[in-house]
Image (cartoon, rainbow, N blue to C red):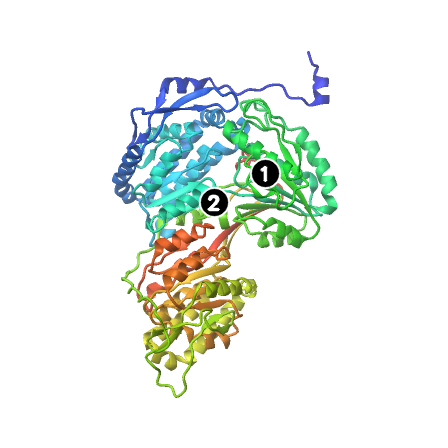
């Protein structure tokens, strides 16, 4: 027998396996699971197996959902929604509070069930996932109570379809169900086919607390079931999963007026600066890429290390990696558990092979028997290597070096994703500077993979749009205050011509496009007849030129809110000085509204603040409203001047650069604004104006990779949304309204002109009594 002194020398752990008898008894009693619809479990249908990935053992059989099952669940949710929404916020809060309490009462059971079904180590299920599940329901119980006072004028969306992945099955359920219920919606949730069991256990909890029938419905199945839910009569789809599937969902929903939020893939940078605490950074790698076996969308899978410390860092990393324990997930001493399924294991290994075939060297990462892969990383990886580009979604990172901070930022942003990043530096100035420059929805400074219900989580670019958690997450489950919508007049098809209606001026004047701060003739050299003369007939080439000019106008985004406000005030001042001239082209009401919009959003430019939110102790959590960058805006075909200013001014106030498609039937009043902009210190390229066939131009604009967000009023919304789905940019379609009235301005426009970045910054010592790793 090994002596205590020998154990102290080796620090070897003996087995300490969590008892799974209670979970296995529950599974045996339940037999084949049906769906949870309308407050009860249905009779089982065609079954499929769910297995323990660590052993291959069949744990249970669940029902493959059909389109008919999904329709029944949606009908139950639809029937329950009015009564659920009619409850007071306090009443809904009590149900959410009860859900949190019952999760805590069954935390050991849920932890073991999650580990058996998913393969993650029991320490992660027990200490992180389940406590965070309870935290989300507690947090959103508070939002249910406060919704009407904190978010006045907002209302539930209706029935929400929710599709979650297999890497955090119960936690993803809580992320989606908690805010939906707090807002007054009902839900139909489809768990991943690999990991449905904790969702079905949660359904039992819903029964235990007496949640009204139909408020939560759970339909199990594979991708076909998810596709049936996307096609169903729901008011919102919330999806977490791969970028490819998210793109397909966006295309399927184009033109349906169904709200959509997407939390998709990532290839997150883990940046280690020369002055970083290297020992702490190595522990950060463990928490970032080897947590949950690397099956984390925001894992720091691209380790970028300053060349000056790379050798020392890699030595420490190898020593730490060698001490990680790969083994049975139910063993409390296991650091890295099983991959969720053989299909996923084979995918990881195939990407590693492609990376090594392309010249990379794999350190560690050996495949074990069953669904096990040891922690590892790829070195000597070029930015074009498949291992650097593709989301491996396993315990394999890449390691590259850089020399300067600018190079680190360039490498960090050299990806189509933008979900998360981790920055390590002992200098707060350096760390926060990098956090501001890296294009990601979440940035951890000197920490990694921290989550909280109060912290908005979501991505930029092809990592999706929308947020989960906190105020931003609640707003994504609420409908904005209704407006008095009006039908927009359909534009006439522009016909190229050389004659117009004529102008009373003594000298003829040629209207031109406004691109890059200068008047430009349309690329095709054609014009079309409009009231007052001829308008330039823009084309795809003109859109390309306008986007290029906007992309180069980063000076506008870099200006502070106060500086942008001064320019907008100046625009209002100069437009006011020429009010009579513009009124002769439109009318006095439109001119007054245009001046008011510039003045209103000048006031907002330095006041649409982010927030420091209460999350884990010992961390500053700053939620920042950032501009998208380059935005496309399709303006309404009525009230051309007021409509243009009502949409362009809020986008400018937040620091975006804009390509605006003016009202196709009457664009000349908008083209005349170039003189106002040129005399108001607006940098060239901050506003670009293209005229012509709006639907055709909007499709081109929405499809452009450099355009990060798209607004459009009227027209062929479905075509614009399909085009925008190519690189998964959000599309907002505000209802046509009286653009001279009070409903044509407000915070809703500012919210849609920004995306939130959540920055975590640890400070001080962790207070005593802060509980588990989740708090």
- Which of the 4 image quadrants contains residue 650? bottom left
Disc nearer the start of the sequence (1/2): 1
Q: Secondary structure at mark 2?
A: loop
Q: Residues within 10 Å of mark 1 (few under 14, many from 20)?
A: many
Disc 1: which residue = 288
Image quadrant where one finds the N terminus: top right
Q: Secondary structure at mark 1?
A: helix
Specify whether 687 is left or right of 45. right
Specify whether 669 is left or right of 452. left
**Foreground label between 1 and 2:** 1
| Most foreground residue, 558 or 533 | 533
- Answer whether residue 375 is visible to the viewer in this image: yes
CB-based contact (under 8 Å), mark 1 and mark 2: no
The total number of labels drawn is 2
Q: Give how far across and how far down residue 112 sits, in percent.
A: 48, 24
| Most foreground residue, 546 or 398 | 546
Disc 2: which residue = 454
Q: Give the CA separation, mark 1 to mark 2.
A: 20 Å
- Which of the 4 image quadrants contains residue 737? bottom left
Q: Give how far across and how far down residue 53 sits, in percent.
A: 50, 24
Specify whether 297 is left or right of 10. left
Q: Residues within 10 Å of mark 2 (few under 14, many from 20)?
A: many
- Answer whether residue 301 is visible to the viewer in this image: no
Q: Give how far across and how far down residue 137 sits, in percent.
A: 42, 38
């Amino acid at each position: 027998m090994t002596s205590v002194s020998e154990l102290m020398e080796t620090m070897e752990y003996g087995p300490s396996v969590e008892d799974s008898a209670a979970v296995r008894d529950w599974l045996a009693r339940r037999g084949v699971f049906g769906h949870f619809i309308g407050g009860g479990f249905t009779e089982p249908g065609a079954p499929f197996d769910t297995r323990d990935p660590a052993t291959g053992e069949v744990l249970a059989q669940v029902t493959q959902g059909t389109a008919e099952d999904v329709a029944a669940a949606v009908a139950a949710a639809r029937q329950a929604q009015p009564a659920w929404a009619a409850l007071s916020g306090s009443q809904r809060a009590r149900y959410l509070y009860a859900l949190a309490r019952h999760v805590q009462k069954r935390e050991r059971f849920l932890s073991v069930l999650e580990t058996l079904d998913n393969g993650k180590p029991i320490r992660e299920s027990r200490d992180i996932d389940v406590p965070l599940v309870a935290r989300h329901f507690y947090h959103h119980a508070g939002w249910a109570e406060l919704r009407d006072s904190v978010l006045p004028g907002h209302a539930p969306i209706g029935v929400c379809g929710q599709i979650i992945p297999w890497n955090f099955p119960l936690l993803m359920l809580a992320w989606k169900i908690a805010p939906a219920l707090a807002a007054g919606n009902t839900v139909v949730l489809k768990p991943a086919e690999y990991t449905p069991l904790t969702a079905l256990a949660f359904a039992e909890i819903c029964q235990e607390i007496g949640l009204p029938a139909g408020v939560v419905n759970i339909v199990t199945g594979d991708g076909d079931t998810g596709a049936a839910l996307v096609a169903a009569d729901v008011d919102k789809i919330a999806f977490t999963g791969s970028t490819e599937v998210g793109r397909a969902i966006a295309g399927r929903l184009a033109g349906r007026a169904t709200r959509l939020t997407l939390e998709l893939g990532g290839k997150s940078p883990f940046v280690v600066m020369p002055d970083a605490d290297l020992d702490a950074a190595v522990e950060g790698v463990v928490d970032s890429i080897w947590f949950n076996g690397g099956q984390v969308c925001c894992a720091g899978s691209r380790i970028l290390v300053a060349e000056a410390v790379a050798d020392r860092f890699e030595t420490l990393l190898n020593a730490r990696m060698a001490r990680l324990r790969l083994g049975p997930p139910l063993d409390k001493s296991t650091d890295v558990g099983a991959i969720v399924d053989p299909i996923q294991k084979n995918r990881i290994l195939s990407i590693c092979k492609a990376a090594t075939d392309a010249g990379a060297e794999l350190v560690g990462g050996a495949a074990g028997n069953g669904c096990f892969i040891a922690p590892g990383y790829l070195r000597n990886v070029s930015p074009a290597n498949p291992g650097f580009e593709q989301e491996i979604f396993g315990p394999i990172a890449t390691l590259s070096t850089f020399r300067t901070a600018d190079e680190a930022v360039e490498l960090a942003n050299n990806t189509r994703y933008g979900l998360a990043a981790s920055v390590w530096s002992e200098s707060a100035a350096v760390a926060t500077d990098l956090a501001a420059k890296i294009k990601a929805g979440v940035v951890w400074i000197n920490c990694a993979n921290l989550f909280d219900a109060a912290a908005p989580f979501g991505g930029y670019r092809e990592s999706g749009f929308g947020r989960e958690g906190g105020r931003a997450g609640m707003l994504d489950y609420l409908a904005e205050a209704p407006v008095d919508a009006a039908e927009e007049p359909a534009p006439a098809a522009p016909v190229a011509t050389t004659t117009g209606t004529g102008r009373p001026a003594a000298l003829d004047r040629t209207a031109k496009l406004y691109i890059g701060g200068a008047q430009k003739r349309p690329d095709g050299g054609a014009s079309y007849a409009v009231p007052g003369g001829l308008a330039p007939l823009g084309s795809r080439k003109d859109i390309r030129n306008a986007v290029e000019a906007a992309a180069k106008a980063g000076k506008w985004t870099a200006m502070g809110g106060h500086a942008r406000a001064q320019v907008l005030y100046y625009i209002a001042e100069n437009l006011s000085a020429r009010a009579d001239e513009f009124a002769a082209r439109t009318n006095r009401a439109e001119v007054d509204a245009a001046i008011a919009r510039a003045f209103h959003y000048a006031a907002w430019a330095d006041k649409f603040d982010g927030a420091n939110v209460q999350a884990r102790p010992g961390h500053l959590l700053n939620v920042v409203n950032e501009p998208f960058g380059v935005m496309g805006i399709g303006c309404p075909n009525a009230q051309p001047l007021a409509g243009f200013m009502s949409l362009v001014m809020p986008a400018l106030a937040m620091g975006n650069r804009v390509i605006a498609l003016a009202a196709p039937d009457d664009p000349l009043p908008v083209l005349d604004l170039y003189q106002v902009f040129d005399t108001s210190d607006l940098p060239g390229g901050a506003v670009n104006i293209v005229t012509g066939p709006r639907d055709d131009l909007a499709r081109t604009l929405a499809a452009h990779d450099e355009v990060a967000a798209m607004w459009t009023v009227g027209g062929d919304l479905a075509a614009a949304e399909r085009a925008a789905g190519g690189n998964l940019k959000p599309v907002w379609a505000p209802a046509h309204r009286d653009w001279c009235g009070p409903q044509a301005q407000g915070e809703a426009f500012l919210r849609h002109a920004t995306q939130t970045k959540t920055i975590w910054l640890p400070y001080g010592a962790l207070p005593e009594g802060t509980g588990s790793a989740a708090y």
